[in-house]
Structures are given as C-alpha cells and as structure tokens.
DNA sequence: AATATTTTCGGGTACGTACCCTATTTACTA
DNA sequence: TAGTAAATAGGGTACGTACCCGAAAATATT
C-alpha cells in the first residue's frame, strides 16, 4: 500500500508535447481538428512511451452503450447441448454489463429451418452493433451474414464455420481435425482389422454440415495411417429414440461391429440402448459434456467423449465483440477451440 | 451508443439517506465516525438497493498497492516445465499491473533443497502481502507456510499441494486422480495381461512427493478395475540422460515391457532413447506439453501426454491473490485443474 | 486592411469512488 | 455555564479518460 510513481498517461503525453489533454485525446481517437505537425509529434511520443490507455478510466468516462444480439439454437428436449454456449454468453455478459453492454437473445429451432430466418429478420429490424451466430443452416446463415454486412453489423460465428464467409471471428472447433482425433483414439479401441460404424444423427444435414466434416476427418485418419479397419457410415434423419434404434438394430443384425462413433452429442441414445439391452463388447465414442452422456461415461458404456468447450465458445464470442468495439483491438479471425478428450477418470475436473 | 439511465451508486445512497457521500463511504468501509442510527439507515438503503460498488471506479480512485512474491523452481536445462507457470504469472501481472500490483520473483533450484530456504528467507525479509508457492520440498514448504502465517502473508500453492496446510488457495492437479486417468488410458494400450513399467525420474523424492501420488493413482486404477496387468515401479535419482538410460536398459534386459508410464515431464528422455535405438513396440505415456515432448508425440513415439495447464496455474494463482486483496472476494480454497489428454492429433489446439 | 471563416487547440466538467481536511454538533469536565 | 474534547458529518479534490464548448490562431474573402 504505497504511492504511485510516475505521471499519468494522457497528462504526461500532453506535458511532453506541450499541448493540452484534449489535443492528445483527439489524436488518440483520430478525431479531426489537429494539425499534421502536432499530430505527428504526439504520435511519436505515444509510440516512444508505449502508451497504453487505462481501460478502467476509459470505460468509466465513456457513456457508450453497445447492443449485441445472439442467434443460436434453443435447447431442445432431445439434447441440452445449446445450454452451454448460452451459459457462456450469459457469464460474459454479466462481466461486461457494467461497461454498457446490452444483449438480446434470438433462439431458433434446430429442427426447423424457417425459425432461423424468422429470428434473423427480427435482428435486422432492430439496431444492433454485433451478433453472435451459430450457423447451423448453411445457406440461411450465409444470407444472414450478407445482410449484416450491408447493415454494418459485425458477426461472430461459433460452433461451426462456413466457407466463403469471413466474419469478425470464428470461435469453435476445427471439425475435420476433431474427426481425426476421434480416429486416433478409436485406433486403440478396435482390433487389427476391426469394424467401425460412424453414426450421424441429425434432422437436417446440409452439404457442408459439421457432422459430415467430422466424419470425413475420422475416415481420413485411418486412411493416412493405413490401418485396415472397415468403416461404414450411417445417417438417420429421425432423431427420436425409437427411430434411431430401429435403424441401428437393422444394421447390427447384418454387420459385425467393434466400435460406434457418433458424430455429435446424441451418443447417449445408443448408450441407453446398450444399457437397456445389456449389450457389451461394442466400444462407444461420441461428443459433448452433457449430463445425459456423463452418466454413461461413468458406467463405462461410453468410452470416450470429445468435447470442444461450448461454454467457453459462447463466453469468448461475446468478449470478442466487446474487445472489438470497446478496445478497438484487432481480434483473432479464428479462435480454434481445443479438442478435449473426456473419460470416466477426468470428467469431474473438466471445465466445459 | 445511448445514455445511462439511473443515478450513480454512492450518490444515490447519499441522496436517499440525506447524508453526504463521505458518510456513505464510511459505512461502506465500516470506518469509525458514524452514529449507529445513520449507519443503520444507510445499511438498510444499501441492502434495499442491492448496491454493488463499481470496481472500475474503485480501483481508479484507490491508490493502494499490493506486493506479491513468487517462489517457484527456476527452469532447468533438464526440463523447461517451469517456464509455463512463470509465463502465466507474467501474463496475469501484465493485466493487473495497472491496478497497482507489484510482483517479485524468487526462483529456487529443484535439485537443491537449500536454495528453497534461501529464497524463502529473502521473501520473509521484505514486506509482501501475498506469495505464490510451488511447494516442491514438503517440509521446507510447511515451515515457510507457518512463517508466512505469523507474518500475515497470504499463500497460494500451485502444482502440488501439501497436507495439513490450508493456504488461501491450492491451484493444481488432483495428483492421485491424474494417475488414475493415466491408468485408464494405458488400459487401452496394453494387452490383456500386459507388463507395465512406472518410471519416476527425480532427484529428490519426499515421502509425499507428487510423483509418488501419481504413481499410486495409476496402480489403484488397475486394482479397482481388477485388470491382471503386471506393474513394476522404478525410481531413479540421477536425472541425466546416461544415468536414466543405464537404469532403464538394466531393467529391460530382464523384463518384458509393453508400456512405460513416466510420472513427470521427463518422458522425452525415454523417447529419445527409443528413437536413437529404433525401439518400437513399447507404448509410452508421460506428462506435460513441452517442446521436447511434443516432437516425440508428433513422431508417434510418445502415445499420450497428460497435461494440467501449468500456464493457467500460474495465471490463476496471481489473479487469486489479486481477487482476495482488491475485491475482498472469498476465493476458492481448491481450484482443481482439468486433467487433459494430449495426442498427436490434438496438441496443436491445446492451450497450456 | 478589415472582416469572415475555418482550422486548431485549451479549459473545464463528468464518470463513481476514496480519502483528506475542516466544520458542526454532542458530551463531558471543572 | 463556559470551555474543551470527542463524536459526527460535509466539502472538496483526485484517480485517468472522454468530450462539450468556446477561444485563439491561421487562412480565406471582400
């Protein structure tokens, strides 16, 4: 608890440049009204001092308010995955609320493309500065992105990216690599010439859908490693329990399987079937840190879960917008999330 | 970019209570000089408003300065592990420096107990408010902790904890569980009745040393899972390459081995030997995200690395002290780090 | 050369909190 | 009851930055 040492920031600059604080302030925010000569002098001093503005004082003094929107799927009864990013966004919001950040939520239905457009339209009606988007529907998302561009609304994408579109930042997994990691793990779980089933469970599957990219990465791994496993890929569009199981049983009847890799969080569906019918001997690998999945991990029915920090994705998405607008910081174009491996022995310590 | 709405905090309280800001300030910091009656009135209003002080304004106005010390091992030529926590501490420091935080570093030599005491003594001579400690030497650390207690210096432990000692916070792995996770992984790597060698490489090994706890967790896993693997534990106290390899060769000559589990970051030593002598067929699992280890992970000589976010440990250690002193926030007594699994396919995305 | 206009700049106040210094009130002593 | 000490309260400035408003200097117009 001692005293400060040097003089403060802008004041010190002003003193050295023999100008007023207001003038320094003008060049800092390159506002007009400063002659080229003095601007250069001040710029030089700023550089020389390596001046960093005091963010506390800045946001204290600033009465600016920014409005952000959030366009992500709502949590469904079938999977609670989207609770996590939402939670992360809420946490970030609570931290930066005091700096004058307003956030509005627009949640769409993963099983209904139309709801995406509806919510997107609502956002465009209002006057937002930025928006966090989970682009589950490729074409719709691209269209929305373009409209945001003309409306000068900054976009941050989370959870899956979209080619040919350059948002302010993408925060999420490298999906192909995520599939490769799954392959890497599964290598250890199956015998020499084992049989693997890759299982896509999703109502909608756009051409570039993220499940397909994981699936592709998975197959690529075994191809590159030249491992002689047999891989079948199966996709079901009816996501309710009976439908999924019906398809699964049909496959199992005719094919030997050592391992099933479910490309999203719905691996618990399979696990439930295994438990209820006392099936063992088939390894199970899937995605996401959900209560529904963890119980089967604990019981040893699911061997591995792969997880990509959904809470942090949401958290960082909002903070990225905040950094961009308040600190005028150049934000990372791509913020690749780690690809985490969760097992029975470490899940209790995992931070989603 | 709109306007604020309500009146500010203390001012509003003062207005409602018909007193001055200074008086409100007194009851907020329960300083003397306020009659019981007005104090009660103000307290009631504070409660009613659910007043939360503006931390920005607070630290702007406060000229308080806190001094923290850091007592951790220095990076050695043998392992660069301790670079990471140091880096995390430095990052945290750069973020909170503006709030008046001073940090001094006292680095000791992992191969020389005496240096711990020397640096510890230096810390006690000066007037610090808090200290970040890596208690590598159990008894010395306990002694230091006690002296800190009488000197009213708050301690935060990182990397490994010490029983019977209750620091402000412990930030690091659950070592026993970390060993269990290793067992969980290795289960998939060895055959039915495989042979495993657990390898401790450390100059000093206190009774409660963290390598031993990992080792214990590892064995416990196989015991609980009732898996009939054969586990030998070997410890070497000479940590240079020739010595380690000499011991290893002696063991390998007489014993079949399917997998070696190295309980710390020195797994690269073994990997180097395997590479130079073209040994394959022995799986290798060890600890820590070091450049030295990653190259062997990439080459497929090391199968898995377990990692516990050393950078974040340092980062959070300093922030914990900061939170405690500046925000008077009750900090978490134990901040268990996640137990992360690193492979060839996900290490590029890992954040240490 | 005098006036109008534009460019360039400084003074001053505000943001919400901390804390010093002084003024007023109350209680106590002789 | 005056006189003094202690308790209680308020005024005011500072923290580092933002930004309004008006003043001075430079340039343009007549």
Image: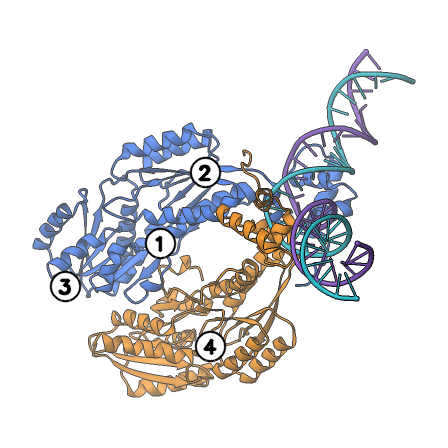
Chain colours: A blue, B orange, C cyan, D purple
- Nearer the observer, A182 or A134: A134
| Mark 4 burial class by Cα count in 10 Å: few <14, some 14-19, many 20+ | few
Q: Earlier in the sequence, mark 1 or mark 2?
A: 2
The answer to the question of whether label 3 and label 2 lie on touching residues, with beta carbons closer than 8 A, is no
- Nearer the observer, B241 or B72: B72
Q: Which residue is mark 4?
A: B165
Q: Secondary structure at mark 2?
A: strand
Q: Is residue B34 above or below residue A192?
A: above
Can you tell which of label 1 and label 2 is closer to the viewer? 2
Label for residue A280? Answer: 3
A262 horizontally vs D1: left or right:
left
Residue at 43% across / 69% down in the picture? B172
Q: CA distance from mark 3 to mark 1?
A: 27 Å
Q: How many marks?
A: 4
Residue A5 horizontal/vertical position (percent): 72, 59
Q: CA distance from mark 3 to mark 2?
A: 48 Å
Can you tell which of label 2 and label 4 is closer to the viewer? 4
Residue at 46% across / 77% down in the picture? B165
Can you tell which of label 3 and label 2 is closer to the viewer? 2
Q: Chain of mark 2?
A: A
Residues flagged by tags 3 and 2 on a common chain: yes
Q: CA distance from mark 1 to mark 2?
A: 24 Å
Q: Secondary structure at mark 3?
A: loop
| Mark 3 burial class by Cα count in 10 Å: few <14, some 14-19, many 20+ | few
Q: Secondary structure at mark 4?
A: loop
Q: Chain of mark 1?
A: A
């Amino acid at each position: 608890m001692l005293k400060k040492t040097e003089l403060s920031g802008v004041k010190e600059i002003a003193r050295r440049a023999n100008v007023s604080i207001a003038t320094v302030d003008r060049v800092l925010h390159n506002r007009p009204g400063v002659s080229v000569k003095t601007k250069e002098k001040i710029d030089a001093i700023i550089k020389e001092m390596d001046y960093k503005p005091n963010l506390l004082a800045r946001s204290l003094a600033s009465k600016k308010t920014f409005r952000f929107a959030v366009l992500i799927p709502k949590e469904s009864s079938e999977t609670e995955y989207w609770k996590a990013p939402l939670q992360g966004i809420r946490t970030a919001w609570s931290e930066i609320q005091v700096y004058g950040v307003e956030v509005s939520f627009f949640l769409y239905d993963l099983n209904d493309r139309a709801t995406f457009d509806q919510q997107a339209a609502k956002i465009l009606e209002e006057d937002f500065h930025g928006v966090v988007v989970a682009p589950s529907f490729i074409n719709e998302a691209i269209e929305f992105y373009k409209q945001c561009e003309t409306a000068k609304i900054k976009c941050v994408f989370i959870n899956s990216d979209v080619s040919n579109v350059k948002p302010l930042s993408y925060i999420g997994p490298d999906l192909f690599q995520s599939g490769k990691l799954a392959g890497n793990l599964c290598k250890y779980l199956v015998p020499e010439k084992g049989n693997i089933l890759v299982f896509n469970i999703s109502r909608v599957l756009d051409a570039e859908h993220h499940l397909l990219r994981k699936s592709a990465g998975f197959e690529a791994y075994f191809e590159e490693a030249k491992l002689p496993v047999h891989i079948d890929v199966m996709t079901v569009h009816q996501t309710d329990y009976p439908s999924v199981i019906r398809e699964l049983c049909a496959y199992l009847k005719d094919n030997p399987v050592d391992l099933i890799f479910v490309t999203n969080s719905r691996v618990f569906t399979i696990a439930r079937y295994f438990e209820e019918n006392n099936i063992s001997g088939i390894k199970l690998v899937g995605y996401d840190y959900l209560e529904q999945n963890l119980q089967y991990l604990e019981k040893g029915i699911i061997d591995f879960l792969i997880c990509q920090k959904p809470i942090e994705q949401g958290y960082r998405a909002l903070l990225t917008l905040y950094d961009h607008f308040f600190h005028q910081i150049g934000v990372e174009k791509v913020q690749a999330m780690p690809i985490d491996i969760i097992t029975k022995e470490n899940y209790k310590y995992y931070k989603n």
